[in-house]
Image: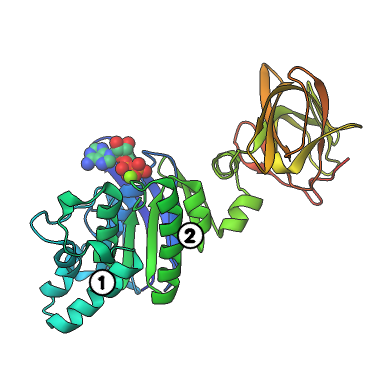
Amino acid sequence: MSIKLTGIRKSYGSTEVVKGVDLEIAEGQFLVLLGPSGCGKTTLLRIVAGLESATQGEVYIQGQEVTNVLPKYRDIAMVFQSYALYPHMSVMQNIGYPLLLRKVPKEERDEAVLKAAQAVHLEPYLQRYPKQLSGGQRQRVALARAMVRRPKLFLMDEPLSNLDAQLRSQMRAELKHLQKKLAVTTVYVTHDQIEAMTLADKVAVINQGVVQQLAPPREIYNDPANLFVAGFVGSPRMNFIRGAIKQGIFSSRSCEFLCPKMADQSAAVLGVRPEDISIVAGEGQIRAAIYSIELTGDETIVTCSIDDEQTSAQIVVRMPADFESQIGEVVSVKITSKRVYLFDAQSQLRLRADGEGEVL
Ligand SMILES: Nc1ncnc2c1ncn2[C@@H]1O[C@H](COP(=O)(O)OP(=O)(O)O)[C@@H](O)[C@H]1O
Ligand SMILES: [Mg+2]
């Protein structure tokens, strides 16, 4: 099932929370709406489901306008952040309920329930009641119930948010596998950038009711459209250094970077990820002082202080596990990759030029 949103706006009273969203989702695609809490993700998903009406704009499903069509005619299965299970029904009955409503014969129903339960590792709990389950188990019942009837469209609102870390990554892999196997078009809402990167065919990064960038995960990571996207995706996040570009040199109090093809810019931001810089013995582009050193096991996360344009700032460098230094030591940081981004500090947009990102 393909979906198209055109010019969607939504206001509550005088507050506009969705500000003109255009999105297209192809049949079988996994689209993730990614953004911070309150940016309008749930509102947008509810508009696709028909549970909320848009103030302006149109929703199309399979090319048909459904803007004013009731949810029950849209053949959609939704999993909400706050899942609602029937307390008086067992896990088996809860999962099978959508099939019971559709008068699917018992044998066929039981088989489908078992399959769905297996997919989310719930077979041992089929006879239990919701109150006898943990939060994570209940969430998985909700997922299985959404999957059981093979809808044409899955809408999921932070469905893994109540699971512990290990189960979450396990369920993430499970969800991705299932979605590909069933090839059901899916719109998935999350504020978790790792979930977005791992699950999505395409990510729509949203901030304050506006789509900032719509692209495959790799492109979101490697080619961010603006400062917001650059800072939201990646952990530890991208380093930002404020300065100015003049005659092909970005400079800040502790940084100098050659960018001969860039136009002058009085207020610019240089962005570079922690894995694209390194503390070196020789010359680097950034002068810094060691602030803290954290060994994670397979690598060392080094935080350094630098002098930014106005105030002091910090940058983070990923170093090998055997990196050693002292707090306070003055070091050179070298940009080791071509992945250097420059932004206009005012508009927050990427500054682009041919052959950008030359390393010194
Ligand atoms: N029914 C409502 N009435 C008034 N404001 C609402 C309502 N639902 C959501 N909002 C507001 O709209 C904004 C977006 O909410 P929501 O879509 O739930 O964000 P997200 O899912 O990204 O966290 C928030 O500021 C929220 O407070
Ligand atoms: Mg939400």
Residue 225 position, x and y percent, is: 60, 47
* Residue 143 higher or lower than 43, as above or below: below
The percent coordinates of residue 292 (x first, y second) are: 67, 24
Residue 80 seen in this snapshot: yes
26 or 79, which is in the foreground?
79
Left-right relation of 173 to 274: left
Q: Residues within 10 Å of mark 1 (few under 14, many from 20)?
A: many
In the image, which disc is placed on residue 148? 1
Return the residue found at the far right.
282
- Nearest the viewer among 190 and 225 is 190
Image check: 40 left or right of 138? right
- Amino acid type of the residue that numbered disc 2 sits on in the rendered structure: Leu
The residue that appears at 71% across and 43% down in the rendered structure is 275
Looking at the image, is mark 1 or mark 2 earlier in the sequence? 1
Q: Which label belongs to residue 199?
A: 2
The quarter of the rendering in which ligand 1 is drawn is: top left
Give the residue type that dot 1 points to.
Val
Left or right of residue 55: residue 216: right
Q: Is residue 58 above or below residue 314?
A: below
Between the residue at mark 1 and the residue at mark 2, the CA separation in whole angstroms equals 20 Å
